């Protein structure tokens, strides 16, 4: 296992290393994301405690918001999640095919989606329109099974779900299929438009409309196991919306959906994005930096090359504003973000060296956060973590004794797992202690 403890590097005589102090061996890596599964588990516990009477659906869509689908799903289950949620069928199939048997809902389909694959894998499905129910029912009939369905009502988001009078039509259609035995409605659900603005009047209005829709469904004979509407923001700040099941996503990853509220809710960021300086050099005053010379130092200075760019998910509009922690101080990107690289002005007299670690965002004191990146680039923290490129290795921390694996479960020491993984394999074989700058 290519894992060492930073303190151990300084103190070779130390006793056994507690798992939470293990850090991945990142020698040879250009850019990587550390995924702290212990923090994720703790976040799930924290959120569960806020809605103790509700089931907990861990939302792991989009590769678990960029953190790695399978390890995150497993950590969430260890933390007490009782359901998993994924937007796309392929994500849900990957969970099942990896042996995860927990109740699982997937919700985005189009005509021709692999409903048989979903029903065959015992996955709950969402329906916002009669045609979805028909395709689900046909798949279930062919398999000789009864499909579990959650009917989605649009209570005012104006996105998915049956709106207005369409709700009654959807309910009546579902009841006909229930009578045939191909479909069983186990859930009624909706999604908020403004849960991230705790005082917004639509929050209450949507809850009221939801209760009406549930009552209409129940009057028609539907007996849902779970009625659900709470995303992270509602889980955190709208207890009246917890209902039978909460569906947090972003909060599980330790990021707040309500950055304007001065409270971290005891959540810990799960992802830390780091890179290593690839080059450090002197540049004279007046020498423009990177494409377009969008940054021009007005004094002789030292610059560092950070081997991470928009192909890795660094927003190009972080040019001149993306925050970094390097050489012990906070600074911002100097000049354009390129496809694979960006530059930082380390300042005159900097003693930084190639190989020094740069933190783009994380959660430790002094580190910029994903929220800082979101603020700097006019987006939300969701996008900052989710957009991370596939070529950035995710190094898992705190995963039951397997702290240095890629998010797909392969060991970082497996040559060829990724280019970076192969580089790490060489370093691991060398077996030497690593520099202690990561703890
Ligand atoms: C239907 C649904 N439920 C729950 C979530 C989780 O939302 P959040 O990450 O804000 O908690 C999402 C994500 O957008 C979603 O689409």
Image (tube, rainbow, N blue to C red):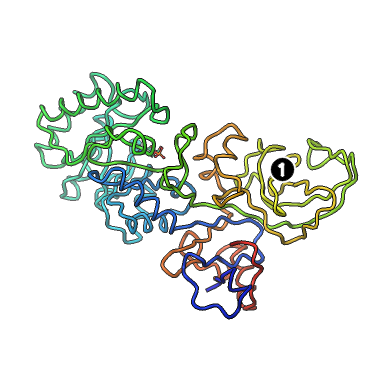
Would you place residue 316 above or below residue 68 in this image?
above
Residue drawn at 36 percent across, 25 percent down: 157
Residue picked out by circle 1: 333
Q: Nearer the viewer, residue 291 or 127?
A: 291
Quadrant of the image where one finds ligand 1: top left
Farthest residue toward the bottom?
Answer: 13
Percent x, y of residue 4: 57, 71
Percent x, y of residue 221: 9, 31
Residue 295 left/right relative to 418: right
Q: Which quarter of the rendering shows the C terminus?
A: bottom right
The answer to whether the beta carbon of the residue marked 1 is less than 8 Å from any atom of ligand 1 is no
Q: Nearer the viewer, residue 234 or 224?
A: 234
Percent x, y of residue 155: 29, 24
Q: Nearer the viewer, residue 48 or 71?
A: 48
Residue 361 left/right relative to 102: right
Residue 341 left/right relative to 158: right
Q: Nearer the viewer, residue 198 or 119?
A: 198
Residue drawn at 61 percent across, 34 percent down: 377
Neighbour class for label 1 at 10 Å: few (<14), some, many (≥20)?
A: many
Q: Secondary structure at mark 1?
A: loop
Would you place residue 1 above or below residue 366 in this image?
below
Percent x, y of residue 37: 44, 58
């Amino acid at each position: 296992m290519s894992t060492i403890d930073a303190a151990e590097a300084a103190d070779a005589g130390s006793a056994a290393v507690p798992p939470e102090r293990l850090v991945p061996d990142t020698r040879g890596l250009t850019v990587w994301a550390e995924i702290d599964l212990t923090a994720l588990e703790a976040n799930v516990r924290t959120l569960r405690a806020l809605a103790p009477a509700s089931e907990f659906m861990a939302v792991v869509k989009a590769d678990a918001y960029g953190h790695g689908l399978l390890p995150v799903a497993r950590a969430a289950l260890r933390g007490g999640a009782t359901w998993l949620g994924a937007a796309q069928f392929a994500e849900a199939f990957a969970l099942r095919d990896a042996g995860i048997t927990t109740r699982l809902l997937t919700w985005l389909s189009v005509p021709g989606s692999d409903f048989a694959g979903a029903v065959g894998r015992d996955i709950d499905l969402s329906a916002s329109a009669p045609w979805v129910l028909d395709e689900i029912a046909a798949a279930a009939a062919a398999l000789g099974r009864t499909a579990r369905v959650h009917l989605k009502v649009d209570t005012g988001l104006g996105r998915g779900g049956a709106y207005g009078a369409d709700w009654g039509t959807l309910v009546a259609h579902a009841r006909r299929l229930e009578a045939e035995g191909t479909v069983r409605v186990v859930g009624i659900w909706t999604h908020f438009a403004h849960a991230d603005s705790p005082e917004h009047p639509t929050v209450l209005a949507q809850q009221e409309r939801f209760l009406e829709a549930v009552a209409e469904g129940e009057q028609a004979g539907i007996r849902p196991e779970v009625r659900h509407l709470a995303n992270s923001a509602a889980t955190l700040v709208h207890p009246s919306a917890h209902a039978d099941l909460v569906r947090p996503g972003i909060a599980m990853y330790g990021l707040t959906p309500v950055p304007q509220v001065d409270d971290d809710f005891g959540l810990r960021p799960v992802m830390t994005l780091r890179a290593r300086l690839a080059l450090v050099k002197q540049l004279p005053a007046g020498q423009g930096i990177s494409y377009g010379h969008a940054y021009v130092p007005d004094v002789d200075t030292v610059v560092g090359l950070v081997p991470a760019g928009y192909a890795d998910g660094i927003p190009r509009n972080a040019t001149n504003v993306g925050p970094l922690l390097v050489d012990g101080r906070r600074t911002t990107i100097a000049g354009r973000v390129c496809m694979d690289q960006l530059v930082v002005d380390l300042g005159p007299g900097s003693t930084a060296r190639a190989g020094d670690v740069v933190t783009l965002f994380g959660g430790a004191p002094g580190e910029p956060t994903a929220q800082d990146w979101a603020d700097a680039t006019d987006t939300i923290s969701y996008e900052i973590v989710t957009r991370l490129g596939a070529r950035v290795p995710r190094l898992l921390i705190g995963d039951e004794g397997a702290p240095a694996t890629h998010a797909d479960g392969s060991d970082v020491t497996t040559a060829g797992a990724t280019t970076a993984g192969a580089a790490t394999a060489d370093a691991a074989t060398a077996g030497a202690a690593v520099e202690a700058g990561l703890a």
